Image (cartoon, rainbow, N blue to C red):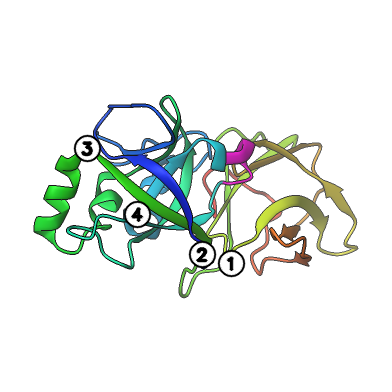
């Protein structure tokens, strides 16, 4: 099926039935949380975002992109919608929780979107795809809970490609001595007693095919980092 995986999906607000399901959030967009994205989690990718259960994978799945399409020929488009995982969440046997906007984008037209939302239950196909953010690089956002200079916490935005960030190292930019970081939760990485001076990151990207590669973001962490900085 060209990489598409079949699963049963749910599209009625807060209604969870049997089997593997997908539903959309009934209160605006997906509430931010388990990935650590804060309000950014509702606006990335133009608001086409989703929470996930199994695909969250203890935070490794944060920022992953999936193309999701429903299979009702009367209402659903062939293209579907590409969503970014920005949170963890599920009801009984629920795999995705799409934003309402993203759920409607699976439809052929606006009228079809209304009908699609009214159906309640739809079948979908989904597959992992590369994330693409034109004119954006991986961005380091200093978390509000950091405590300079003793404790550093940050979240990674605009993860590109279709690989997972599995290891992050914090490196001194002058002598390139690196320290392994902890994934606190979601896309938030932390360390106590961070090195001094301007800092850079090294990230190990791992693919489903076993391919791995180290990358260094172009953005550095300034010497005197502060909460909220990017």
Which circle marks residue 131 in the picture? 2
Residue 206 in which image quadrant: bottom right
Direction from residue 195 to residue 1 in the image, left or right:
left
Q: Give left or right: position of 13 versus 63.
A: left
Counting residues from the start of the chain, the first of labels 1 and 4 encountered is 4
How far across and how far down the image is residue 70, in percent?
32, 54
The answer to which image quadrant residue 108 occupies is bottom left
Q: Residue furthest left?
A: 111
Magenta highlight on residue 205:
no
Q: Disc 3 or 1, which lies upstream in sequence? A: 3
Secondary structure mostly seen in magenta is: helix
Residue found at x 18% / y 44%: 117
Q: Position of residue 57 (x, y in %)?
A: 62, 39
Q: Secondary structure at mark 4?
A: loop
Visible residue check, residue 199? no
Give whichever of discs 3 and 2 has the lower sequence position: 3
* Residue 120 numbered mark, or none: 3
Q: Which residues are drawn in magenta?
A: 56-61
Query: Alpha carbon of mark 3 to alpha carbon of mark 1: how far?
Result: 32 Å
Q: Foreground residue, 138 or 195?
A: 138
């Amino acid at each position: 099926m060209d990489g598409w995986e079949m699963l049963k999906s749910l599209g009625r607000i807060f209604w969870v039935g049997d089997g593997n399901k997908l539903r959309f959030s009934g209160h605006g967009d997906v509430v931010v949380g388990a990935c650590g994205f804060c309000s950014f989690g509702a606006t990335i990718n133009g608001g086409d975002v989703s929470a996930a259960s199994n695909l969250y994978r203890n935070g490794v799945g944060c920022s992953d992109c999936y193309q999701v399409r429903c299979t009702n020929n009367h209402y659903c488009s062939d293209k579907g919608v590409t969503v970014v995982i920005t949170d963890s969440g599920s009801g009984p046997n629920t795999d995705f929780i799409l934003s309402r906007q993203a759920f409607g984008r699976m439809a052929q037209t606006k009228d079809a979107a209304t009908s699609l939302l009214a159906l309640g239950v739809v079948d979908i196909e989904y597959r992992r795809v590369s994330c693409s953010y034109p004119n954006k690089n991986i961005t380091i956002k200093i978390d509000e809970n950091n405590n300079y200079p003793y404790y550093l916490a940050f979240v990674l935005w605009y993860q590109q490609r279709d690989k997972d960030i599995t290891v992050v190292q914090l490196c001194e930019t002058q002598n390139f001595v690196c320290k392994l970081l902890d994934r606190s939760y979601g896309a938030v990485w932390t360390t106590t007693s961070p090195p001094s001076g301007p800092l850079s990151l090294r990230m190990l990207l791992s693919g489903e095919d076993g391919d791995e590669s180290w990358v260094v973001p172009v953005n550095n962490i300034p010497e005197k980092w502060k909460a909220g900085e990017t």
